Amino acid sequence: MKPFNYQKADSSNAAVQELSSNNQAKFIGGGTNLLDLMKSGVEVPDSLIDITKLPLAEITELPNGGVRIGALARNTATANHPLIREKYPLLSQAFLSGATQQLRNMATVGGNLMQRTRCYYFYDTATPCNKREPGSGCPAVEGFNRIHAILGASESCIATHPSDMCVALAALDAVVRVVSASGEEREIPATEFHRLPGDTPNIDTNLQENELITAVDLPPSYFSHSGAKSYYLKVRDRASYAFALVSVAAVLEIENNSIKTARLAMGGVAHKPWRATNAEEILIGATQGEEVFRQAAETALEGAQGYQHNNFKIELAKRAIVRALMTVAE
């Protein structure tokens, strides 16, 4: 591991000012992803700015009935918080589907947003990778690509985003709050926080270089309505410490067998959490049932492209969507 400086920030302003003055610095919270990347030589910061002492770990109810989750809230604490369990059970399920208990105890919400792909070519510094070295190539396209993207990929990159939490945030219309070195605050919809690879797969998010994530805001809950239910389904190779081959975050509000509200997002299928708005349009106003759920699944996977080893994910994703929607509707 490359030697680095270490310092603790005593305020959000001090943290972003330090980051602005050194483009080789990185924020560190739980460190559950960053330290792995540093050990592998993928990330080589010359300075770590410890932000764990900043007052960004609270989970509070907003005046409009929504909830604000501080960027330093730990994954376990967030999953088990009464406001999250009661108002956003989908998010709680997604958290508890990720990693292991020990990692969830350390990992933060902000870090979860910023975690990088688990593509094995990205982690192997002996191989080329456009995410590590733009222009060097994407060996996954012609190589072993069982875990890779089937939606929104490009010739430059077919990696997938690994987070479970972010899939739920996309389905819940969450907003990411950030602050810059000038003190300016802005909001980024969760569906727009991460990027598709295009020809710049080295840029994972729309966060600017001098910005710090301070919180995630959840809008007033769909689950405050008696007819709204949700389910997070994660299909993976083993029951724990495994990333999704396909995951589905589904929300339905049903009244008299008619679907009033639908939210559908997928993980494990693209470079970012994939919100299937085209499938939602099929569902809203329809009568619930397996037939319309299958139609929504087919629509959600329109344009999907498999590669040599991951063609199975297209059918798997369709079946996962139907299963998730059927579970919600039960």
Image (spheres, rainbow, N blue to C red):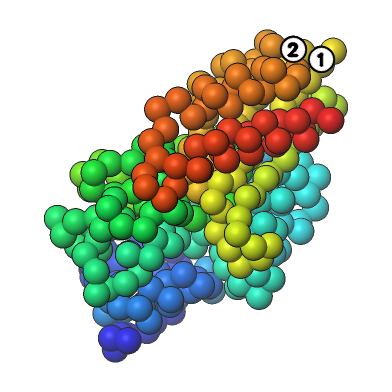
Residue 3 spot, x, y in % from top left = 29, 89
Residue 104 spot, x, y in % from top left = 64, 68
Residue at 71 percent of width and 35 percent of height: 323
Q: Which mark is residue 257?
A: 1
Residue at 50 percent of width and 43 percent of height: 312
- Is 23 displayed left or right of 231 in the figure? left
Image quadrant containing the N terminus? bottom left
Residue 314 spot, x, y in % from top left = 50, 37
Dot 2 alpha-carbon crowd within 10 angstroms: few under 14, some 14 to 19, many 20 or more: some
CB contact under 8 Å: marks 2 and 1: yes
Dot 2 lies on which element? loop
Between the C-alphas of marks 2 and 1, the distance is 6 Å
Q: Which mark is residue 227?
A: none
| Amino acid type of the residue that numbered disc 1 sits on in the rendered structure | Asn
- Is 10 displayed left or right of 259 in the figure? left
Dot 1 lies on which element? loop
Residue 113 spot, x, y in % from top left = 48, 55
Image quadrant containing the C terminus? top right
In primary-sequence order, the first of circles 2 and 1 is 1
145 or 119, which lies in front?
145
Whether residue 116 is visible, yes or no, is: no
Residue 118 drawn above or below residue 124 = above
Return the residue at label 2: 287
Residue at 54 percent of width and 24 percent of height: 298
